[in-house]
């Protein structure tokens, strides 16, 4: 019987191995990410500002519809799809690594080995985002009896009543669970799909295996990302102009540190 030769995608997947990260590595990734941001701060911050502008437009739309109390949940869930939006930042770090200077056109027109596979991953993350948004809406409706309050009244309800505090705890637990799922399937999957012609299940499988086999360093990395994003959101998105490119560049270095190519 004639045996079929393995496809290019299969061969590429077989050549990828994972190095075991240490507890010091997440700090090193952030340091390298900061160095990349400092190479061309105008370009990195412009990218971050573009990401923030999308979030602000959505928030303004909710405000105009009288749904500003939903904005915090939407903002938190928006970070679930952040890894896909950071493709241009990964491309910047890749070019720096190769001794090149990226231009604005390079980071907004990244060439992918398989656009369809990246689209599948984007769809998976968007699905998690929509699930989070739906659960957050149901959680709010359950504890507020569907009464969408202005933001000032919402804060008083959320922080000053037993129902509101319970709502925050339940919402935080739900959000943390979904964020951990998104982190596990995407922490290195997007850079892998950016650089290698592999299928999305292989990229997601590598990412999940990395998190499952190395819970200490990867949970530290997830915690650092969560803290930085929370700081960015707490400044009404302004801090994300810096945080988003910093985490994006650092994620590329996490991938380069962990994924070994035979």
Image: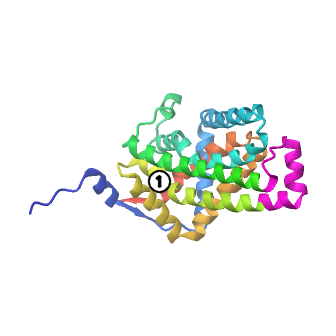
Is 5 on the left-hand or right-hand side of 90?
A: left
Residue 262 seen by the camera: no
| 11 and 175: which is toward the camera | 175
> Does 166 appear in magenta?
yes
> Is the residue 247 above or below the residue 102 in the image?
below
> Does 164 appear in magenta?
yes
Please state, as top left, top right, bottom left or bottom right, where the N terminus lies in the image: bottom left
Q: Residue furthest left?
A: 1
| 4 and 195: which is toward the camera | 4
Q: Secondary structure at mark 1?
A: helix
Please state, as top left, top right, bottom left or bottom right, where the C terminus lies in the image: bottom left
> Is the residue 180 above or below the residue 48 in the image?
below
Is 225 on the left-hand or right-hand side of 153?
A: left
Query: Percent position (x, y) of residue 57?
Result: 69, 32
Query: Percent position (x, y) of residue 78?
Result: 64, 45
Q: How is the image coloured?
A: rainbow
Query: Percent position (x, y) of residue 7?
Result: 24, 52
Report the magenta residues as a range.
143-168
Number of marks in the image? 1
Residue 162 seen by the camera: yes
The residue located at (58%, 64%) in the rendering is: 218
Q: Name the dominant secondary structure of the magenta segment.
A: helix
The residue located at (78%, 44%) in the rendering is: 69
Q: Residue furthest top?
A: 105
- Crowding around mark 1 (Cα neighbors within 10 Å: few <14, some 14 to 19, many 20+) is many
The residue located at (67%, 46%) in the rendering is: 243
The residue located at (55%, 41%) in the rendering is: 85
Query: Percent position (x, y) of residue 145?
Result: 80, 52
Q: Which residue is mark 1?
A: 189
């Amino acid at each position: 019987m004639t045996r079929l030769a393995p496809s290019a995608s299969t061969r590429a997947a077989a050549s990828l191995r994972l190095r075991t990260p240490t507890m010091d590595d997440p700090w090193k990734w952030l340091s390298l990410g900061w160095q990349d941001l400092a190479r061309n701060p105008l370009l990195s911050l412009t990218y971050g500002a573009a990401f923030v502008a999308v979030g602000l437009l959505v928030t303004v739309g909710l405000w105009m519809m009288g749904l500003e109390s939903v904005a915090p949940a939407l903002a938190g869930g928006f970070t679930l799809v952040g890894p896909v939006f950071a493709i241009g930042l990964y491309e910047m770090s890749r070019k720096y690594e190769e001794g090149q200077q990226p231009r604005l056109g390079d980071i907004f027109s990244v060439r992918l080995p398989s656009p369809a596979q990246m689209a599948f991953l984007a769809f998976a993350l968007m699905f998690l985002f929509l699930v989070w948004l739906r659960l957050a809406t149901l959680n709010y409706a359950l504890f507020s009896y569907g009464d969408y309050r202005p933001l000032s009244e919402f804060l008083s309800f959320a922080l000053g009543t037993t129902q509101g505090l319970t709502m925050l705890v339940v919402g935080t637990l739900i959000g943390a669970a979904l964020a951990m799922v998104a982190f596990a399937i995407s922490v290195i999957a997007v850079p892998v799909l950016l650089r290698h012609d592999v299928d999305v299940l292989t990229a997601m499988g590598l990412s999940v295996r990395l998190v499952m086999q190395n819970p200490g360093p990867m949970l530290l990395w997830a915690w650092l990302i969560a803290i930085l994003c929370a700081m960015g959101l707490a400044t009404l998105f302004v801090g994300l102009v810096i945080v988003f490119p910093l985490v994006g560049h650092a994620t590329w270095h996490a991938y380069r540190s962990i994924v070994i190519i035979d």
